[in-house]
Each structure stands twice: as C-alpha cells, then as structure tokens.
Amino acid sequence: MPLSQTVKKEPVAVEVKDLRKSYGDHEVLHGVSLSVAPGEIFVIMGASGTGKSVLLKHIIGLEKPDSGEVLIGGRSAFESSTHRDIVTAIVFQDGALFNSMSVYDNLALYPREHRIYDSKTIHEKVMDTLRILSLENAAQKMPSELSGGMKKRVAVARALMTEPQLLLYDEPTSELDPIMSATISELIATVSRQTGLTSIVVSHDRELSLSIGHRVGLMHEGNMTFIGAPDELKASKDPLVTEFLNPKINLENPRFRKTENGK
C-alpha cells in the first residue's frame, strides 16, 4: 500500500507573521515571518539556541507568542478548533515513544483512543504502516529494544497513523550516525513525495537541510536571516550563511591549546 493511501485530507499552507516571544527579559524570537506552501518540505536550520524549537512549538500551538500570529490553513494555530479540524503531527527529537507500550500499541494508541476505526481496521492500518517503514518485525518489541534510528522510524510511523495534513520534525537526525541520518532524511523525503504532506523540519544538520528541503530558512539569534532554495543558500554571500555552511575552527582559542602535560 503506498503512503498516499494513509492521508485523507489535503495538505495545508502555514504562515508565520512577525512572531515575537520572550522569556523574562530574554527575547527568543525577534519578529519571525515565513510561509510554507501546501505539500512543501520547509527546513528551518540554524545553530543550537537560535530559536528553532521555540518557533516549532508556536506552529503546533504549544506556545503562545507575545505578538504576531501563526496560521495553519488560514486559521490561527492558537485556537483549539484548528488542531481538531486540521490534523497536525510532530516527530519529537527523542521519538517520545511510550516506553511501557510495544511498537504496535504505540501506533494503535491514537485510533483506539479516538475510536476512529474498529479493532480489525486498526490492526490492518498499523501493520500496513509498519510494513511501509520496514518495521513489521518490530511490532511486538518494546522501545527499549530499539536502536536510535528505529525509534525515529517508529515515531514517524506513529505520526502517520493520525493521517496528518501537516507533519513537523524536531531535529530528526540528532544523535544518529551519518548512515542512519541519511536513512532518516531519505524517509522524510519519501513520506513527503508519496503523501503530499506539508512538512516542516527543524534541524542543524546541514546535509539533511540541503538534500531534502524544497526551501530552507536560516535562523540566527532569533531572526530568520535567509529563506530560499538550497541552491540559493549555497550561492549566498551573506556572512551568516557562509559561516553556518562552512564553519571554521579558531585554533587560537585557548580550549584547543595543549596544557603543559600535553592534554
């Protein structure tokens, strides 16, 4: 069964307009704006601590801004009815699987709790989704028995069980080796291609960002400093862009100097 059969509704556009957010005296988002077209993979990239994950929390409605707005399908992300009517799913950085449940039960939880299908249909959909991601042999395993890469794949499978119109990924390749990172990147691209889902990926992984993003936005100190296609990003002469894509180690930094005992 192709992935396209798991999605019932049309993908949605996302608009972020002049979003500002502070925690105490520290302003984390400084008037961030962006737009994501239906079916697009938009990658938000940048170094750690630039506000990427805070922006993602606003898009999914977990945080409310001090000012500005987020629109999903033309509706405010901060209205509960929006996420009831427009299905949004998120793949968290650590997978966020329920450790007391098997892989099968992690996937079956959403349709069971919401009584969307009968038990036979739930079983068919869970097993179909696991097969799509080559996880059918892991159905009865517990999360503690899975590798980091398998946990990420299960998290994607669980997200697809909600039949989302918008799928968000928070640092999907963190703590993975280069080979598994490439596998997860390929999976994100495949899911997007076969389902037509609108996807927003938050990552500091340059390889992922440039290989799967239809467009990328570069964040720096709470500002969106660049938005464009990967080729435009690579061709940019903006110092912030070139520094991010080609970081240089300052060997004069004291932490790189040997101590008297050679350590």
Image (cartoon, helix red, strand yellow):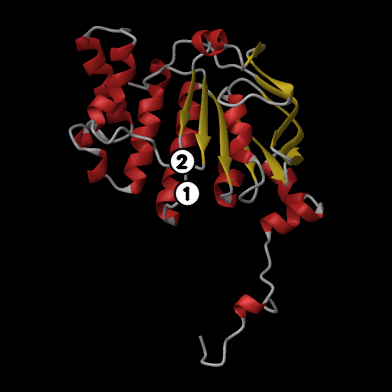
Question: Which residue, given by chain and number where applicable, does mark 2 sit on?
Answer: 93
Q: Looking at the picture, tell me which residue is in the foreground, 208 or 51.
A: 51
**Residue type indicated by callout 2:** Gln
Q: Earlier in the sequence, mark 1 or mark 2?
A: 2
Check contact, mark 1 vs mark 2: CB within 8 A.
yes
Question: Which residue, given by chain and number where applicable, does mark 1 sit on?
Answer: 174
* Disc 2 element: loop
Q: Is residue 144 left or right of residue 68?
A: left
Q: Is residue 36 above or below residue 11?
A: below
Q: Looking at the picture, tell me which residue is in the foreground, 91 or 209.
A: 91
Determine which quarter of the picture holds residue 1. Answer: top left
Q: Is residue 149 left or right of residue 262?
A: left
Q: CA distance from mark 1 to mark 2?
A: 7 Å
Residue under the point 78% across and 50% down = 236
Residue under the point 57% across and 11% down = 82
* Disc 1 element: loop
